[in-house]
Amino acid sequence: MRTLKLLAFLVVASTLLAAAQQKTASPAATPPAMSPLRQEILGAFDYGAQEALALAKAVPEEKYSWRPMEGVRSFGEVFMHMAGSTLLFGSMTGMKIPDGPAHDLATVYMKQGFEMPELFAAEAAVKDKAKILAIMEQSFQIGRDLIRNMPEADLDKSISFFGRPMTQRGLLIFMGNHLNQHVGQAIAYARVNHIVPPWSQPQPKTK
């Protein structure tokens, strides 16, 4: 009899323990679903980020210093601006300066009260293609994470973007729009230099 009672106790206890573990683990295992609007905001940003990186990889390193005229950003500076401005948008939501490849650029772009010459100097400071690509990759991932993880309740919060009132939702949309504008700029640079963007390359015919 004692053996049966002990066996019954162990079965009940193990069942309760398994249920408790499953309850504890399930929130981490299941990320919150994004609304259709947030998915569209993320999709637009990610589309620009992927094209920006693909084009930055396709441009030869010796062309990174090319600019259409004096006083205009070079290829490399445009790519750095894409990365830095993404960090700037994040700073408007209270995001902290990250460690990693983008850290030095972030210290300028995410500083309140920066001056434009500081930004231009930070963009021009990095010449190495591999480092610029690493900075872009990190900053774009930060942008994606910002869109994915911003609490739903924060989307309607009002902020001031250089004196212009907008919601944080509007800021996320603007972040993607801004990135895609500079992708267009980089495409124009590429075409002038007879560089075909990777997505416009002729595709092999399928039988």
Image (cartoon, rainbow, N blue to C red):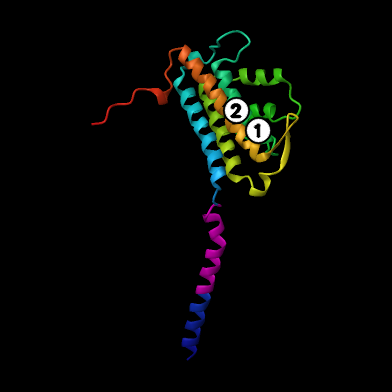
Q: Nearer the viewer, mark 2 or mark 1?
A: 2
Q: CB under 8 Å between callouts 2 and 1?
A: yes
How far across and down, in percent of the image, does residue 128 sit? 54, 20
| Span of residues in magenta | 15-32
How far across and down, in percent of the image, does residue 61 sit? 48, 17
Outermost residue to the top: 70
Q: Main secondary structure of the magenta part?
A: helix
Q: Label 1 sits on what residue type?
A: Phe
Check disc 2 and report its element: helix, strand or loop. Answer: helix
Residue drawn at x 67%, y 21% as measured from the top left: 119
How far across and down, in percent of the image, does residue 205 sit? 27, 27
- Which labelled disc corresponds to residue 178? 2
Q: Residues within 10 Å of mark 2 (few under 14, many from 20)?
A: some
Magenta-colored stretch includes residue 22: yes
Q: Nearer the viewer, residue 91 or 205?
A: 205
* Left or right of residue 195: residue 91: right
Residue drawn at x 61%, y 32% as measured from the top left: 175
Q: Label 2 sits on what residue type?
A: His
How far across and down, in percent of the image, does residue 143 sit? 59, 36
* Left or right of residue 192: residue 162: right
Check disc 1 and report its element: helix, strand or loop. Answer: helix
Q: CA distance from mark 2 to mark 1?
A: 10 Å
**Residue 97 is at least partly visible in this image:** no
Residue annotated with mark 1: 89
Point out the tag, 2 or 1, that comes first from the N-terminus.
Answer: 1
* Image quadrant in which the C terminus is located: top left
Q: Is residue 121 above or below residue 144?
A: above
Q: Quadrant of residue 103?
A: top right
Q: Nearer the viewer, residue 74 or 7?
A: 74
Residue drawn at x 61%, y 40% as measured from the top left: 146
Magenta-colored stretch includes residue 30: yes
